[in-house]
Amino acid sequence: MSIALHERPGRDMRRGPAATRHGDERRETRDESAAASARRASARRDSRTPRAAMQVQSMHFKARAGEKLADARLQENLRRLSTKFVSGRAEAVTQLDFVATRAQLKARRDRALERLDVWLEMFEREAARRGTTVLYAQTTQDAAKLVADIARRHDVKKVIKTKSMVTEEANLNAVLARLGVQSIETDLGEYILQINGNEPPSHIIAPVLHRDKEEIADLFAKTHGRARLTDISEMTREAREVLRPHFLSADMGVTGGNFLIAETGSVVLVTNEGNEGMCTVLPRVHVAVTGIEKVLPTLEDLATAMRLLPRSATGQKTSNYFSLLTGVRGDGDEDGPEHAYVVLVDGGRSGLIGGEFQEMLRCIRCGACMNHCPVYQKVGGHAYGWVYPGPMGSVLTPSYVGLANALDLPQAATLCGECDSVCPVGIPISGLLRKLREKQVERRLRPWRERAALAAWGFFARRPALYALATKLAVRVLERAGGSAGGVAGMLGRMPFAGGWARGWTATRDIPAPAGRTFRELYAASRTHLDPSSTR
């Protein structure tokens, strides 16, 4: 039976657009509800402090990106993306009809979101029937408090964790540490980050992507007090030897949840290391912390998702380990937790339901968008300043913590559309980024210089004769500037009268100077040349 450590969210909070067909007389029509939900979500985001417990550094994307671009070691490590994840996915998706399967999964995820309240209630009911306690957290701070309360109730001294992005949102390890509870990361990448001063992950499926083998070898030798190893297999074995005693002595296991199955009340975990099995069957208490959007109605929906998740994430046909966790240890069972909890976290997600960014909730956290993003491939994950990097993070972070707290992220993309083409649930990420840019302009959140420049361009663009004169003058100035400042003749070594981002175009390259005539002049000349009457 569910216990009320935290008040369960009301039906309005969990309602999708289609749920307006299933309510009482006070409910609005579907279109009115969606619009009202979007307005309320916008108002909440504009008037509050960030929801996230983890400190948000997304306002510093430009400065951080510059630092990462100058980091030669990081640049070499990031090059592994193209050889491992990108090529692996490209080969894996040829094993099925990707377009058709993606359409199926998109429809299934939309069905789940449109009646989210129904499926969450079903999940809670079925999980409770099997002995699992389901709790709701409106904020990530609430989620961390709930987990801490569970640890206190069961006299927990040591926690073992699997990789979980939602617990990163909640900064759970710091909360447990303040309670005096030791928390050990057991995912190899997360463990490396933890012993390296609790460094944040830089990728959602490969958290230590930014570190190479030599750096990790030095870290292991320093932390473990053993001889320095350089063979990856031996280093992995050493980590396993260090972690094994923690698996056997932990009181509580904390995991995320890739999916939640409403019809069975099950939590799904998908990993390649097997640590999720140790974290869920050995400790006497298991807590799964995950977002409310992860629910799927049926096991059939899960089957479709599993055809695309491993292929999109790591280029595998299937992951090494798959766990379907249902309830607590039963009579005659040899393993499993005595107490099982699921903490369902809102953390800004309900604000997207019924609005123009609801599609982002389809995300299954495969990481394909960032693997293929030309911006992420050059700056890595830490430049984005919060839990979720890459294109998906550039939409999720402003949506969860407020657009004013992540001003640079909607601009942190080329809008090339590669993320759209590889997304296994068909999220139009580039389109959502454009919408965020529009909102920045509408709310006057862009820098004044940028707004002034656009206003000036608009002034000239509405006056064709003046526009033609201004462009003609600009071309003449740039032509004369060619070869200046020690540059090559006909090339611009620096942009005249430019500052800020414009100066960056010539910081590491020369660009061709105009040939001295505007496009209009060249076009007019070409038409004259082609006109037979001009030769008479």
Image (tube, rainbow, N blue to C red):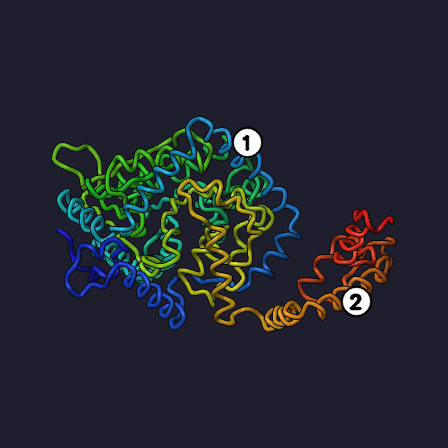
* Crowd tier of the residue under label 1, counting other residues whose Cα lies within 10 Å: few below 14, some 14–19, many 20 or above: few
Q: Label 1: state its secondary structure.
A: loop
Q: In the image, is residue 81 above or below residue 389?
A: above
Disc 2/disc 1 C-alpha distance (Å) = 63 Å
Furthest residue toward top: 95
Viewer-closest of 157 and 405: 405
Check disc 2 and report the residue beneath it: 473
Q: Nearer the viewer, mark 2 or mark 1?
A: 2
Give residue 331's position: percent from left, percent from top: 12, 35
Measured as percent of width and height from the top left, residue 66 is found at: 63, 57
**Which numbered tag is attached to residue 194?**
none
Q: Looking at the picture, which amino acid does disc 2 mark?
A: Leu
Q: Secondary structure at mark 2?
A: helix
- Classed neighbour count for the residue bearing mark 2: other residues with Cα under 10 Å, few (<14), some (14–19), many (≥20): some
Disc ID at residue 231? 1
Above or below 264: residue 429: below
Sequence-wise, the earlier of marks 2 and 1 is 1
Q: Residue at x 15, y 63 (%)?
A: 25
Whether residue 241 is visible to the viewer of this picture, yes or no, is yes
Depth check, front residue: 384 or 178: 384
Answer whether residue 273 is visible to the viewer in this image: no
Q: Is residue 89 above or below residue 470?
A: above
Amino acid carrying label 1: it is: Asp
Q: Position of residue 55 (x, y in %)?
A: 44, 63
Closest to the observer: 261 or 33? 33
Residue ID at (29%, 60%) = 31
Image quadrant in which you'd find residue 79: top right
For residue 518, above or below residue 108? below
Question: How far across and down, in percent of the image, does residue 81 sit?
Answer: 55, 39
Left or right relative to 485: residue 34 = left
Q: Residue at x 41, y 41 (%)?
A: 187
User: Is residue 206 toward the left or the right of residue 180 in the image?
Assistant: right
